[in-house]
């Protein structure tokens, strides 16, 4: 048990068809305990998980893993074999994990009707039940309500092996992780502590590297100025010792120049110039060795399309079927052009079904509504990338500027046919902004986004001039951005009610 670990040895990896490597000469070791993987969307966090558990092979280098491994991906369109096994198992341990994470074994037969939060609980319960020596989990708290999230955190805390976890949930990383790995620009760097401690150390290191680079650049400038001065002196010396300006009969002048050459005085300026040039090259190498990553500005400014309509939506009271004889009842819902609404409720209560009904009932121009669903299939994400590639250069530049300001590299995004879920959400959001939407509807808007992107999105939506409808379990996010709440209350196993309330 104590020997479980994963070690990367000079690992390099590039996706098939990729224009730039995901990893370059990465060497690091992940011991027992939880390591949080953080970094920008598309930076390679999911790829690192897949390499660690053997789902991908490195192009160069080696990966050594001691112990059996298990991987829980972000996407949950289909149940894994492990999910089916835990739901069908009669073992006492399987029963214990189902109870601990609130999993109904009947869920496996109606997977398409489950909320994403319910699916996530099944997959994590199955992973912990299998008790692998190496466990890699991608965004485990996505879609989870507060109670389910707390149960999941407690369950993960009991895991004994090598845990690798990708998450934008800062509180989870602080509570769970003994170390964090920053994954960006093809490299992986480990820092001790949870997210807050590790990121403080990483920021301090970046600041010190920036100061060191500034000092090194100042040395380069001083030496370069000295080299320029010496070269001027050498040029002047060359001019003074040249015989071309002397008359053929000026024997005394020619003798003086020959004597200067023999004594070596005429070459002193040139030798000093050569010495300084060597110092300059050394200073330039020292400055270049200090790794200071370029940081791009984040945050976006919205210019929503103006609408003259008094109301964007009037949805008559109705009863929505949720599957398995469950329903959600709601009163007549009205959305104004500047309303800022939050929908809250537990997993499986019908929030996403309600949002889809609202979007379907919208009768305004299609371009004025931006709907970002809770999840996006890989096929849909690929369609978005292809559509972006086909845009005129000026429109594409505008779109990619927004993507960059949301924290992703445009070149990497356009080059891939397989954008990460976070990159796909950013691209969809940027597309809606470019076309001038008047109403933004987002189901779990912070899911799959890295921490910097969440903060950029939060700041941008605070200034959004149009209507806003957000479904989220992130109370901090909602409290800053919304002014009215629609709460889904579960009455019994078959019925949920929507209760509009002002905040």
Image (cartoon, rainbow, N blue to C red):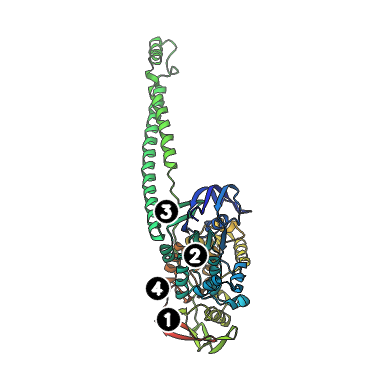
In the drawing, what numbered circle is on residue 191? 3
Contact flag, marks 4 and 2 (Cβ < 8 Å): no
Tell me residue 131's x, y (percent).
Answer: 54, 63
Contact flag, marks 2 and 1 (Cβ < 8 Å): no
- Mark 2 or mark 1, which has the lower sequence index? 2
> In the shown orientation, is residue 434 left or right of residue 461?
right
Q: Which residue sits at x=38%, y=41%?
A: 216
Q: CA distance from mark 1 to mark 4?
A: 11 Å
In the drawing, what numbered circle is on residue 449? 2
Tell me the SS state at disc 2.
loop
Q: Which residue position holds label 1?
A: 484
In the drawing, what numbered circle is on residue 465? none
- Mark 4 or mark 3, which has the lower sequence index? 3
Tell me the SS state at disc 3.
strand
Q: CA distance from mark 4 to mark 3?
A: 31 Å
Looking at the picture, does residue 195 appear above or below residue 235?
Answer: below
- Mark 2 or mark 3, which has the lower sequence index? 3
In the drawing, what numbered circle is on residue 480? 4
Q: Nearer the viewer, residue 81 or 146?
A: 81
Q: Nearer the viewer, residue 57 or 452?
A: 57
Q: CA distance from mark 2 to mark 1?
A: 25 Å
1 vs 3, front mark: 3
4 vs 3, front mark: 3
Residue 97 visible to an observer of this rendering? yes
Q: Nearer the viewer, residue 254 or 482?
A: 482
Categorize mark 3 by other alpha carbons within 10 Å: few (<14), some (14-19), many (20+): some
Looking at the picture, does residue 214 appear above or below residue 32?
Answer: above
Residue 372 visible to an observer of this rendering? no
Quadrant showing the C terminus: bottom left
Looking at the picture, does residue 133 appear above or below residue 438?
Answer: above
Categorize mark 1 by other alpha carbons within 10 Å: few (<14), some (14-19), many (20+): some
């Amino acid at each position: 048990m104590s020997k479980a670990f994963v070690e990367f040895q000079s690992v390099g990896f590039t996706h098939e068809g990729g224009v730039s490597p995901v990893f370059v000469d990465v060497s690091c070791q992940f011991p027992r305990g939880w390591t949080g993987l953080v970094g920008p969307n598309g930076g390679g966090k999911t790829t690192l998980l897949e390499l660690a558990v053997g789902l991908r092979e490195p192009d160069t280098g080696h990966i050594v893993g001691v112990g059996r491994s298990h991987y829980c991906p972000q996407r949950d369109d289909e149940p894994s074999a492990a999910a089916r096994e835990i739901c069908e198992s009669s073992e006492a341990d399987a029963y214990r994990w189902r109870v601990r994470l609130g999993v109904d074994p009947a869920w496996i037969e109606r997977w398409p009707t489950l909320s994403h939060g319910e699916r996530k609980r099944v997959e994590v319960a199955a992973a912990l039940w299998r008790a692998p020596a190496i466990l890699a989990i991608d965004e485990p708290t996505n879609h989870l309500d507060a109670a389910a999230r707390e149960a999941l955190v407690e369950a993960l805390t009991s895991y004994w092996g090598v845990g690798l976890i990708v998450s934008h949930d800062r509180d989870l990383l602080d509570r769970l992780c003994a170390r964090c790995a920053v994954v960006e620009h093809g490299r992986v760097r480990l820092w001790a502590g949870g997210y807050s401690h590790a990121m403080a150390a990483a920021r301090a290191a970046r600041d010190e590297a920036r100061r060191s680079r500034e000092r090194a650049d100042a040395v380069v400038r001083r030496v370069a100025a000295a080299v320029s001065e010496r070269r001027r002196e050498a040029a002047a010396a060359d001019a003074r010792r040249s015989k071309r300006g002397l008359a053929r009969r000026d024997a005394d002048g020619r003798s003086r120049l020959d004597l200067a050459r023999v004594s070596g005085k005429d070459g002193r300026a040139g030798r000093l110039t050569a010495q300084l040039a060597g110092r300059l090259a050394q200073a330039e190498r020292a400055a270049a060795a200090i790794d200071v990553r370029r940081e791009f500005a984040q945050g976006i400014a919205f210019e929503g399309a103006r609408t003259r309509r008094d109301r964007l939506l009037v949805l008559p009271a109705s009863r929505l079927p949720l599957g398995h004889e469950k329903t959600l009842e709601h009163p007549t819902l009205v959305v104004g052009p500047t309303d800022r609404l939050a929908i809250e409720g537990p997993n499986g209560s019908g929030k996403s079904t309600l949002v889809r009904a609202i979007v379907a009932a919208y009768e305004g121009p299609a371009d004025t509504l931006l709907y970002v669903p809770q999840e996006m299939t890989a096929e849909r994400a690929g369609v978005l990338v292809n559509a972006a590639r086909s845009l005129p250069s000026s429109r594409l530049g505008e779109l990619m500027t927004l993507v960059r300001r949301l924290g992703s590299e445009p070149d990497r995004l356009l080059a891939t046919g397989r954008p990460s879920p976070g990159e796909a959400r950013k691209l969809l959001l940027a597309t809606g902004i470019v076309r001038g939407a008047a109403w933004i509807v987002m189901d779990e808007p912070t899911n799959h986004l890295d921490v910097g992107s969440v903060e950029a999105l939060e700041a941008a939506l605070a200034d959004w001039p149009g209507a806003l409808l957000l479904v989220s379990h992130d109370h901090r996010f909602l409290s800053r951005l919304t002014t009215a709440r629609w709460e889904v209350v579960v009455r019994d196993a078959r019925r949920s009610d929507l209760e509009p309330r002002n905040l």
